[in-house]
Image (cartoon, grey):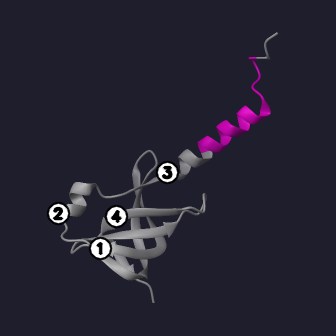
Amino acid sequence: MGGNRRYPDAADQRADEIRLEQEKLGNPVSLTTAEVRHTGARAEAPEPVPVIASVRYRVVYEEPRRVEGEAVAWTRGAVLVKYPDPMTRQDRLVWVYANAVTRRT
């Protein structure tokens, strides 16, 4: 016999709710490889540099968000920023234009 298709299992419903919550948070948008290449030669940081960066997020649209992270590499015109995602607690790496980054004090 089949299950009740009219009413989803509580686990399925919770999974849908979690997915919707995550989609509302959006995803960070990194510069493309071509955009980074056009900013100059890449330099690696011997030690990560604490920064605050403006990272574009795509929700239904893109919106900049101020994040605290570390500059781990850069070119003349772009910076690779590593920062913790507040929801997943996983590190994110995104390239942003250099003028979107300031050094934290």
Helix, strand or loop for the magenta stretch, by majority: helix
Query: Mark 3 sits on what residue?
Result: 26
Query: Mark 2 sits on what residue?
Result: 38
The residue lying at 56 percent from left, 61 percent from top is 90
The residue lying at 65 percent from left, 36 percent from top is 16
| Earlier residue among tags 1 and 4 | 1
Farthest-out residue, bottom = 105
x, y percent for residue 39 = 19, 67
The answer to whether the residue labelled 3 contacts the one labelled 4, judged by CB atoms less than 8 Å apart, is: no
Q: Which residues are magenta?
A: 5-20
Between the residue at mark 1 and the residue at mark 4, the CA separation in whole angstroms equals 9 Å
Look at the numbered disc 2 and give the secondary structure of its residue.
loop
Per the image, is 58 magenta?
Answer: no
Q: Amino acid at mark 4?
A: Trp
Q: Amino acid at mark 1?
A: Trp
The N terminus lies in quadrant? top right
- Whether residue 60 sits left or right of residue 15 in the image: it is left
Of marks 3 and 4, the one in the foreground: 4
Between the residue at mark 4 and the residue at mark 2, the CA separation in whole angstroms equals 12 Å
Query: Mark 1 sits on what residue?
Result: 74
Image: 22 above or below 54: above
Query: Mark 4 sits on what residue?
Result: 95
x, y percent for residue 49 = 41, 82
Q: Nearer the viewer, residue 91 or 22?
A: 91
x, y percent for residue 14 = 72, 39
Label 1: how many Cα within 10 Å (few below 14, some 14–19, many 20+) = many
Image: 3 above or below 78: above
